């Protein structure tokens, strides 16, 4: 969970000092931090915030970006963080902190665990509470303590899958598969989770090929069926429109479908239209043919965000930022 960052020119080391996301630098200067796109923190309560950022937590903010607030008559500066990967939780023993001296109280959050198994148990507890990022961080610390415990990589892979971080999940799963001393049962779990990660990456053929090597149980059979469905959608544009409509009526809609682009269209240069590129037909297209089916980048529904969100906007700001 603590990536290397030698290629960043600026690195701001801070620690959290209040229940809201207020941080201070070593000089004691306090500023608000606004986190965007951080899984699990939208409308998060105090318990969830404390699980992610206990008071005294030391973190590095990579390439910090400070801007002025525009929601009050007295604008104030705050640090905006758009990517969760720009927040790096640092252990007190991390080399970055060797020369850091805090001007205010010397309190820094420290864990009391000394073994990888203790971190493993904590991660399991956090995962069961659906606190996937803290769980992944706990298992990462366990891996730092004892990299030979393959279940830590396996567990972290599952947390990454639940977060939708499928590339990272695939790395952990394939790491376990590459270990010669892995037990057969662990190898089966690792193969299945690698297939789940490949499914999430829309690599349906790779996932299906991996599943074909596993002994078929209920989970494997279901995922193989879903792979076949996605391949039909991706190659032929054959969708179950009724099921999609029904799934879209859920309070939290989720459409598990593949993307499709008709083979008769392509992006190509269009010099006869003034230059540039455009979508052109490369073959005959019949009336009624499905040309493109792509997943949306983001969406919201009126029942999810209005008027509930509008009524809570100021509360959200107070809770997360101060």
Image (cartoon, helix red, strand yellow):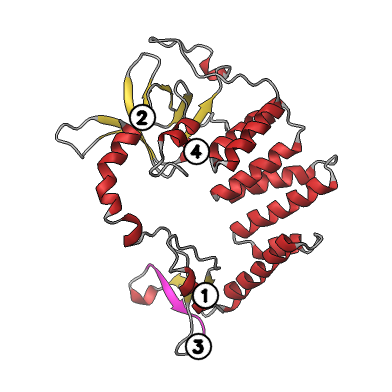
Question: Which element carries disc 1, helix, strand or loop?
Answer: helix
**Foreground label between 4 and 2:** 2
As measured in the structure, the alpha-carbon distance from the residue carrying label 1 to the one carrying label 2 is: 42 Å
As measured in the structure, the alpha-carbon distance from the residue carrying label 4 to the one carrying label 3 is: 46 Å
Quadrant assignment for the N terminus: top right
As measured in the structure, the alpha-carbon distance from the residue carrying label 4 to the one carrying label 2 is: 20 Å
Question: Which element carries disc 2, helix, strand or loop?
Answer: loop
**Foreground label between 4 and 3:** 4
- Picture mark count: 4
Mark 3 sits on what residue? 284
Mark 2 sits on what residue? 20
The disc, 2 or 3, on the residue closer to the chain's N-terminal end is 2
x, y percent for residue 141: 63, 29
The disc, 1 or 2, on the residue closer to the chain's N-terminal end is 2
- Please name the residue shown 69% across and 61% down the image: 207
Res. 243 mark? 1
Mark 4 sits on what residue? 85
**Foreground label between 1 and 4:** 1
Is residue 79 at all visible to an observer of this figure? no
Few, some or many residues within 10 Å of mark 4 (<14, 14–19, 20+)? few
Of 246 and 61, which appears nearest the observer? 246
The disc, 1 or 4, on the residue closer to the chain's N-terminal end is 4
Based on the picture, tell me whether residue 262 belongs to the magenta stretch.
Answer: no
The disc, 3 or 1, on the residue closer to the chain's N-terminal end is 1
The disc, 4 or 2, on the residue closer to the chain's N-terminal end is 2
Of 174 and 157, which appears nearest the observer? 157
**Foreground label between 2 and 3:** 2
As measured in the structure, the alpha-carbon distance from the residue carrying label 3 to the one carrying label 1 is: 30 Å
Is label 4 in contact with label 2 (beta carbons under 8 Å)?
no
As measured in the structure, the alpha-carbon distance from the residue carrying label 1 to the one carrying label 4 is: 36 Å
Few, some or many residues within 10 Å of mark 2 (<14, 14–19, 20+)? many
Q: Residue furthest bottom?
A: 287
């Amino acid at each position: 969970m603590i990536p290397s960052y030698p290629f960043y020119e600026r690195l701001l080391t801070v620690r959290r000092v209040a229940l809201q996301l207020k941080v201070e630098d070593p000089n004691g200067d306090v500023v608000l931090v606004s986190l965007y796109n951080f899984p699990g923190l939208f409308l998060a309560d105090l318990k969830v915030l404390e699980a992610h950022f206990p008071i005294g937590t030391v973190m590095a903010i990579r390439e910090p970006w400070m801007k002025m607030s525009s929601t009050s008559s007295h604008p104030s500066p705050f640090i905006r963080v758009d990517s969760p990967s720009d927040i790096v939780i640092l252990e007190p023993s991390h080399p970055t902190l060797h020369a850091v001296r805090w001007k205010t109280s010397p309190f820094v959050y420290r864990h009391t665990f000394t073994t990888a198994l203790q971190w493993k148990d904590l991660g399991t507890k956090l995962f069961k509470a659906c606190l996937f990022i803290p769980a992944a961080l706990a298992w990462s610390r366990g891996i730092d303590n004892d990299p030979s415990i393959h279940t830590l990589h396996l567990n972290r892979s599952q947390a990454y899958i639940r977060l939708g971080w499928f590339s990272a999940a695939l790395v952990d799963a394939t790491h376990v598969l590459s270990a010669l001393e892995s037990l057969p049962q662990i190898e089966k779990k690792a193969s299945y989770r690698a297939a789940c990660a490949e499914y999430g990456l829309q690599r349906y053929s790779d996932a299906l090929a991996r599943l074909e090597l596993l002994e078929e149980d209920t989970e494997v059979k279901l995922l193989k069926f879903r792979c076949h469905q996605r391949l039909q959608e991706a190659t032929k544009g054959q969708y179950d429109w009724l099921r999609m409509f029904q799934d879209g009526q859920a309070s939290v809609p989720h459409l598990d479908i593949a993307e499709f682009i008709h083979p008769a269209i392509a992006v190509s240069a269009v010099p006869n239209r003034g230059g540039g590129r455009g979508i052109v037909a490369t073959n005959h297209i019949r009336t009624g043919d499905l040309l493109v089916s792509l997943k949306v980048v983001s969406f919201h529904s009126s029942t999810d965000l209005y008027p509930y969100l509008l009524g809570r906007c100021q509360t959200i700001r107070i809770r997360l930022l101060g």
